[in-house]
Image (spheres, rainbow, N blue to C red):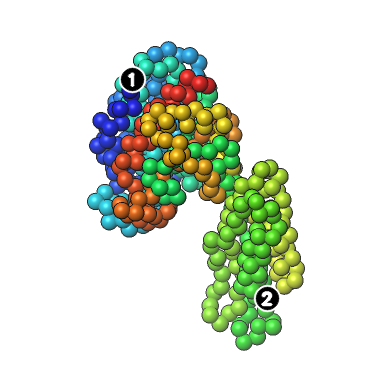
Amino acid sequence: MITDEAEIFKSELAALRRDFHEHPELGFKEFRTSKVIYDYLRAIGADDLRNIAKTGIAGTVRGRVDNGRTVVLRANMDALPVQEKTELPFASENAGVMHAVGHDAQMAVALVVAKILSRNHNSFNGNIRFVFQPNEEVAGALEMINGGVLDDPPVNAALGMNFTYMLPEGDIGLSEGRVLGTTEEFVIRLTGRSVNTAWPHYGIDAAIGAAKVLEALQTLESRKYDPMYPISITVGKINGGTARNIMVGEIVMEGTIRFLFPREEEALDEIKTDVESLVDGVCSFMGMQYDIEFIHSNSSLVNSRKLVEVLKSSARMVNIDYDKMRHFTSLMGEDFAEFAKRIPSVMTFFGIYNKEADCIYPNANAKYNLRDDVLVEATKYYAMGLVQCLNFL
């Protein structure tokens, strides 16, 4: 069986992942990463190699017969602006940049799956396109799609992956329907009137206004919406003030709105209206001016029911039992949703939590890490799953 080759290439999987981990690059700056991927795909004989969206790479492995079906396996390339604190022997050499969400693992898995299927191309019909996407953290998927990554020939389905500490090692998250939340970012600028703190009655304190807005936002999410559907409105950054003895005249608050509601577009319009009404009320009461900018980040990711069933069957073929397949949803955003809005798609979540190996840190943490065994299991899963998707599309 072709999936047996994942064990053969275990050391290669580890070497690739560690090389990517040691040399992380931020979004649209993945120049070294892009070259490593391109050279690898060319060496294994992948066809139709393309450079898309600045640093993105795509290549195709063709089966015995072109039956008009094409499936994508997508892996992310970019790292995060995080100073690594793992003390691993292959820790990041680039100060302030780290693969802290498993994109290094995604690339290694996708490359070795491409190698295995290229070596066994006579065992399946159709095309498998391997897509290495830059800048996932700032929605690079749309640029890949606009660059034609789903065209020539048209793609019928797409698979994506995520490595998360929210599941124990050996388990996978594989659910149909909405699995990841809608993400909207916002910037709120509150303008009051600065004055020496000796005369607070002559000023308008933007800091007090920001405190009231911050508190009210939490009431909005806990009292305005149906508690059966999750929502999180969080301010992650606040800037304001010039000196200890001067009342704050202007504050800028930046944050995110994340939710999993059934009617995504209607819900987003309602939430944005509510946020602005809340800010307007506070500012009217205090005599402040305000400005709000909403920045769309990611739509909800919806997993295809049919493909989930195919992948559950595939998982069983590589000895992942049903009791290891978890229902998984999260409010994190992922621009793989752009693929899922256009073609049937599924993202699978691989658990990495292993207390004995100290793989206990969440995505984006400076100590995030995973074991090599997880890469082997993911490689088996996708080598089988891609072929089965071609069979059942």
Left or right position of 195 against 12: right
- Furthest toward the bottom, the residue is 198
Which residue is under mark 1? 120
296 in relation to 13, above or below: below
Expressed as whole percent of the image width and height from the top left, the position of residue 56 reads 43, 35
Category of crowding for the residue at label 2, using alpha-carbon neighbours closer than 10 angstroms: few (below 14), some (14–19), many (at least 20): many
Instruction: Indicate the amino acid at tag 2.
Output: Ile
The number of numbered discs placed on residues in the rendered structure image is: 2
Q: Secondary structure at mark 2?
A: loop
| Residue 387 placement: quadrant | top left
291 in relation to 72, above or below: below
Q: Quadrant of the N terminus?
A: top left
Expressed as whole percent of the image width and height from the top left, the position of residue 323 reads 45, 39
- The mark closer to the camera, 2 or 1, is 1
Which residue is under mark 2? 204
Left or right position of 235 against 266: left
Taking the spot 65% from the left edge, 85% from the top edge, the residue there is: 199
Q: Compare residues 214 and 383 and report the one nearer the observer.
A: 383
Q: Compare residues 145 and 76 and report the one nearer the observer.
A: 76
Category of crowding for the residue at label 1, using alpha-carbon neighbours closer than 10 angstroms: few (below 14), some (14–19), many (at least 20): some
Taking the spot 61% from the left edge, 73% from the top edge, the residue there is: 207
Instruction: Indicate the amino acid at tag 1.
Output: Asn
> From mark 2 to mark 1, how far is it between C-alphas?
71 Å
Q: Earlier in the sequence, mark 2 or mark 1?
A: 1
Expressed as whole percent of the image width and height from the top left, the position of residue 222 reads 65, 60
Left or right position of 382 against 294: left
Expressed as whole percent of the image width and height from the top left, the position of residue 225 reads 69, 54
102 in relation to 191, above or below: above
Q: Secondary structure at mark 1?
A: loop
